[in-house]
Image (cartoon, rainbow, N blue to C red):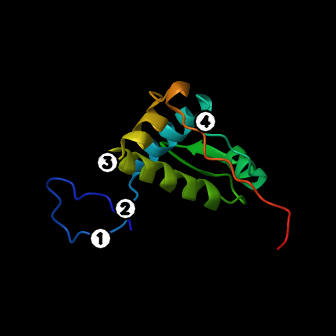
Amino acid sequence: MISEPMRKGHVRKFRKGFNTTHGSKIAACARLKHLIETGKMELTSKSLISELKAFIASGFSFKAKSGEHDDLVSSLLLIVRMSQLIADWDQRVFETISGTHTEEDYEAPLPIFISSTLS
């Protein structure tokens, strides 16, 4: 299970997991926008794209239009926050989301051979 680290000066009882605040939601939305615009994240889910189209700015925050859902967008924002936390410990994830990963660093997976002969 991934949990956010406890912030300095936190006095309340600390709850494991991710606590979404106004600031963390805005930061995750900005990061998601950057990942999509730079081509580091490609969306193929029609329902997610549909929800993103209905995900609008409302005052100083973001939410779905009235009568629409934003469950998939909210879960994607949590994934973005998790990837940022994992990037602190894993250099490969950091290079992938920060853009320092080059094509020369890519290692192709080993091929899989399937024999059609039965014994």
Q: Residue at x 38, y 62 (%)?
A: 18
Q: Residue at x 78, y 51 (%)?
A: 46
* Above or below 47: residue 104: above
- Residue at numbered disc 4: 36
Percent position (x, y) of residue 52?
A: 67, 47
- Residue at numbered disc 3: 89
Q: Front-most of 99 and 22?
A: 99
Quarter of the picture holding the N terminus: bottom left
Q: Residue at x 61, y 53 (%)?
A: 73
Amino acid on which the number 3 mark rests in the picture = Trp
Q: Front-most of 117 and 78?
A: 117
Q: CA distance from mark 2 to mark 1?
A: 8 Å
Badges 2 and 1: C-beta atoms under 8 Å apart? yes
- Is 10 placed left or right of 66 in the picture? left
Which is more N-terminal, label 4 or label 1? Answer: 1
Amino acid on which the number 4 mark rests in the picture = Ile
Q: Give the label, 3 or 2, closer to the camera.
A: 3
Q: CA distance from mark 3 to mark 1?
A: 21 Å
Q: Give the label, 1 or 4, closer to the camera.
A: 4
- Residue at numbered disc 1: 15
Badges 3 and 1: C-beta atoms under 8 Å apart? no
Q: CA distance from mark 3 to mark 2?
A: 20 Å
